[in-house]
Amino acid sequence: MATVDEVAVGDKVTVRKSADVPMSFKGTVMKVYTNSALVSIDSYQETDQNIVSDLKDKTIINFKHIRVTKVAAKAAKKPAAKESDAAAKKNSK
């Protein structure tokens, strides 16, 4: 079971079929909510094609059904932005 602290946008996840989830699939987190996440459906069984097309290739899944398989790389632009801000401050003096 994942928590809001463990799931981030861009993470690769696996969702297993259960009473609340009609099919098993692999996907990517698109948005994180308080107790759930919007997940794009990337990989699924061919027999579930109708369900996936009805869902328009995305669905909201509760964290208790999400297993994070690959954590997304953190944004590398943030440190670069700090460096450019520091350089701008230095040049303005």
Image (spheres, rainbow, N blue to C red):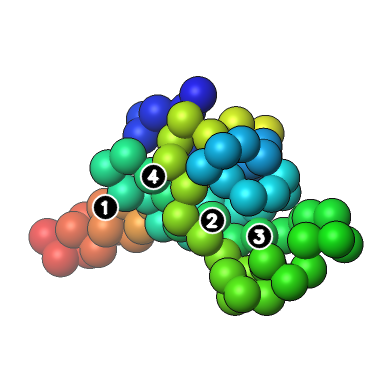
Which residue in the protein does label 1 denote? 86
- In the picture as drawn, the residue positioned furthest to the front comes out as 19
In which quadrant will I find the C terminus?
bottom left
| Number of residues whose C-alpha sits closer than 10 Å to that of mark 3, classed few (under 14), some (14–19) or many (20 or more) | many
The residue type indicated by label 2 comes to: Val
Q: How far is disc 1 from disc 3 in space, using C-alphas?
A: 41 Å
Q: Does label 1 or label 2 sit earlier along the sequence?
A: 2
N-term mark: 4 or 1: 4
Verify CB contact (< 8 Å) between mark 3 and mark 2: yes
Query: Residue 36: which disc?
Result: 4
Q: Can residue 83 be seen in this view?
A: no
Expressed as whole percent of the image width and height from the top left, the position of residue 74 reads 50, 44
Q: Label 3, on which residue? A: 41
Q: Decide: marks 1, 3 in contact (CB < 8 A)? A: no
Q: Mark 2 points at which residue?
A: 39
Label 3: element kind: strand
- Asked if marks 4 and 1 touch (Cβ < 8 Å), the reply is no
Amino acid type, label 4: Ser
SS at badge 1? helix
Residue at 72% from the left image edge and 60% from the top image edge: 42
Pick whichever of labels 1 and 3 is earlier in the sequence: 3
Q: Could you tell me which secondary element the residue under label 4 belongs to? A: strand
